[in-house]
Amino acid sequence: MLDPVPATRSSTGLAVRCTRALLSPWSRFSLLVAVLLASAVIMLLFEPQRLLASGGWPPHLDGSAAAMLFGLAYGVCTVAFVPRPLLNLAAGALFGAQAGLAAALAGTVLGAGVSFLLGRVLGQDALRTLLRGKYLKAADGLLSRHGFRSMLALRLFPGVPFAAANYCAATSRMGYPPFLLATGLGSIPNTAAYVIAGSSASSPTSPVFLAAMGFIVLSGAGAALVAWRRRHRLGRAGAASGEAAPKAGARAGDAA
């Protein structure tokens, strides 16, 4: 009669190996890529931004309930890479300046939070092994050490795409609460400008619309200037960290 113990141990070992393989960093990263690709494909096929812009809500929903539904849909759409400026303009056109701004900000924080969690849980361990370039290392250092301040600057001067900032922050060691707080506060000015522009788009010569568009243009120019200056700072920081590593290794060798 065959002893069942070896067979049991073999099946248990196989299950453990399969579990480790499924939970490995690169397996989780592959799942993240699959989720993001599926989201992008769904966005291209169904174009949910048209539904948001046309206000295709159930007939019994209006007012605050419709704004809440819009905020939820806004968050999902940002995860699926729908451009936020289009969603912000739609929020202003559908709900006006005040309710539209509240719905857009809620959707912004929701979408950023979901993207951050996806990147942190599924992609951080794998992506951190790819941080070899000096700019990537310097950016990771800024987000890890000065997460709130750095993310607040990224949101105030929207030169970096929304999704890219979310996943860069998730890859770093930045905390979740500072990320959400910086996203909420830093997104207010630019989001408000787009929402106000959308709410007053029917009067393109009105002072309100012109002021909102002027702010959008100025914030874009400021973002380009900040990105140019930060690129040089990141280059210097990366060069300094690259010089520090050989010196530290030399000191360790001398000590040995």
Image (tube, rainbow, N blue to C red):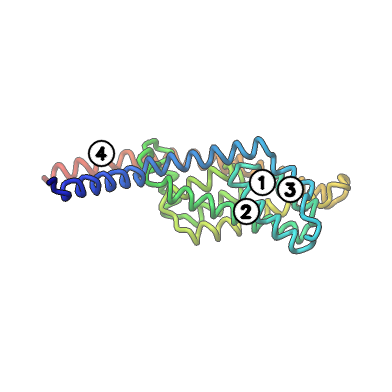
Query: Residue at the spot x=60%, y=43% of the render?
Result: 80
Q: Earlier in the sequence, mark 4 or mark 3?
A: 3
Secondary structure at numbered mark 2? helix
Q: Is residue 188 visible?
A: no
Instruction: Kindly identify the amino acid type of the residue bearing the numbered disc 1.
Output: Arg
Tag 3 residue? 52
Report the mark closest to the observer, 4 or 1. Answer: 1
**SS for dot 3:** helix
Q: Is residue 39 left or right of residue 211?
A: left
According to the picture, the residue beneath numbered tag 4 turns out to be 246
**4 lies left or right of 162:** left
Q: Amino acid at mark 2?
A: Thr
Q: Earlier in the sequence, mark 1 or mark 2?
A: 1
Find out whether the residues at labels 1 and 2 contact each other: C-beta distance under 8 Å: yes
Residue farthest front in this picture: 1
Q: Which residue is mark 1?
A: 84
Q: Residues within 10 Å of mark 2 (few under 14, many from 20)?
A: many
Discs 2, 3 touching: Cβ within 8 Å:
no
Q: Position of residue 46 (x, y in %)?
A: 68, 39
The span from disc 4 to disc 3 (Cα, nearest Å) is: 54 Å
> Which percent across, then down, holds residue 17?
27, 44
